[in-house]
Image (cartoon, helix red, strand yellow):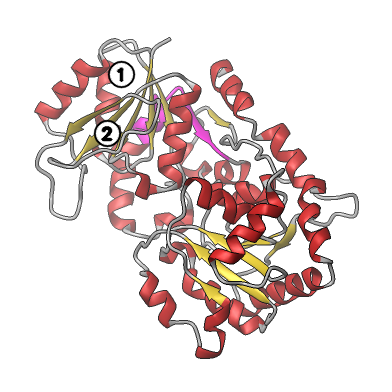
Amino acid sequence: MQAWNVCTELDPSLAGLYRGIVDFACALDSPVLSFCRPGSEVERPAGVPVRSVACGFNPPGYACLFVGPAAARSADRIVGDADLLVVHSLFRGHVGWASRHAKHSRARLWSVPHGCLDPWGLKRHWPLKRTWLATYGSHFMEQAACTLFATNREQEKARAWTGCGRTAVIPWPVALPDLGDREAARLRFRRRLSLPESSIILLSAARLHSMKRPIETVAAFCASDARDAHLVMAGMDGDVRSAQLAASVPPGHRDHVHLPGPLHGPELRDAWLAADGFISLSHRENFGYSFAEALAHGLPTIVSSGHDLAWDLPMDRSGRWPYGWLLPDDAPRSAADAIAEFSRCQRGIDPDRRALAPHRSPARAWVAEHLAPARFRERLLRL
């Protein structure tokens, strides 16, 4: 079977969407066709063939909204007689091209919305998105052999748009990390930030984007008055800049909020191993790779109710969510109270025991069973 992944603007700055496309490409041993702006350069992920096609003229501010005739012909030649087109995300010209190509070939379509049908995201540019859904979207959903979601909650929230079309839930893959070097990594990362070796680190790993609510995260941390804890917010600038975020920290808390910028490779691995907990107050995470990574590292988590993956995790025997704090709402006080409680819990644990605790986390066992890359590949091939 020859499959192609079809998307627009494949770029690491797209964070979870970029990682998701690469995960599909690796699992299906399939290349990527990326429609892009003229002159833009595509960073090619290791081991994944990528072909890029410039879309042609588009309205300013709406890159790849349409695929011009010349671009469509180039894409037709590149894909040829593929058996399957996996169409990632919606609302751009690549969807219309894939639909037309499938009509004139034997290719089947899979649609992978990546959160595009979430009610929170649909509020942004709603008139344009509603027009697109009425003009192209409903037909495309009917044409697709299957629409794939990462979580059950994402599937439920999208039901109004998928109608009676076939859907499936297949959680994205996250490999279980080795925690063997954790104590050494804890020391390295604390020395990098000039922190005491016994300090408690609450980690946020996400783009500095308003959807992720970084300013609200800083405000909740400072309101918690968790003086013995340190908030580390690792991530690249988005529509919120690191300078803007730094300026939002009250003077009395600046020694406890750290903005190391984007971390990659060994530095990111050290950050995960060094952390005592994870926080994300994001409005919407239809999967949430960072949250899944935190679970894989066995960390207690503080997450907003917008994390769809959190609702797929099993409760304990008493009916409690045993992975940390799943917040009931987006109220600042709810997050501040959870951070304060996290700090109190960590303060009562000897630092040596904190270093060992993740090995015993039930979250790691769940990740190993449900998010294993081999299982993701098996599910896709069976589908």
Tell me the quarter of the image containing the N terminus.
top left
Tell me if 78 is positioned left or right of 300 in this view. left
Tell me if 153 is positioned left or right of 147 in this view. right
Q: Is residue 145 magenta?
A: yes
Residue 41 in sight here: yes
Front residue (pair 191, 26): 191
Q: Position of residue 271 (x, y in %)?
A: 58, 56
Which residue in the structure is indicated by mark 2?
A: 94
Q: Residue at x 54, y 75 (%)?
A: 257
Which residue in the structure is indicated by mark 1?
A: 102
Work out whether 165 lies above or below 348. Answer: above
Q: Residue at x 49, y 36 (%)?
A: 163
Q: Secondary structure at mark 1?
A: helix
Q: Nearer the viewer, mark 2 or mark 1?
A: 2
Q: Is residue 148 magenta?
A: yes
Q: Position of residue 308 (x, y in %)?
A: 60, 50
* Mark 2 and mark 1: Cα distance apart in space: 12 Å
Q: Residue at x 68, y 40 (%)?
A: 178
Tell me the quarter of the image containing the C terminus.
top right
Q: Residue at x 14, y 21 (%)?
A: 73
The region drawn magenta spans 138-150
Work out whether 125 lies above or below 315. Answer: below
Which circle's residue, 2 or 1, is located before the other in the chain?
2
Q: Position of residue 169 (x, y in %)?
A: 59, 33
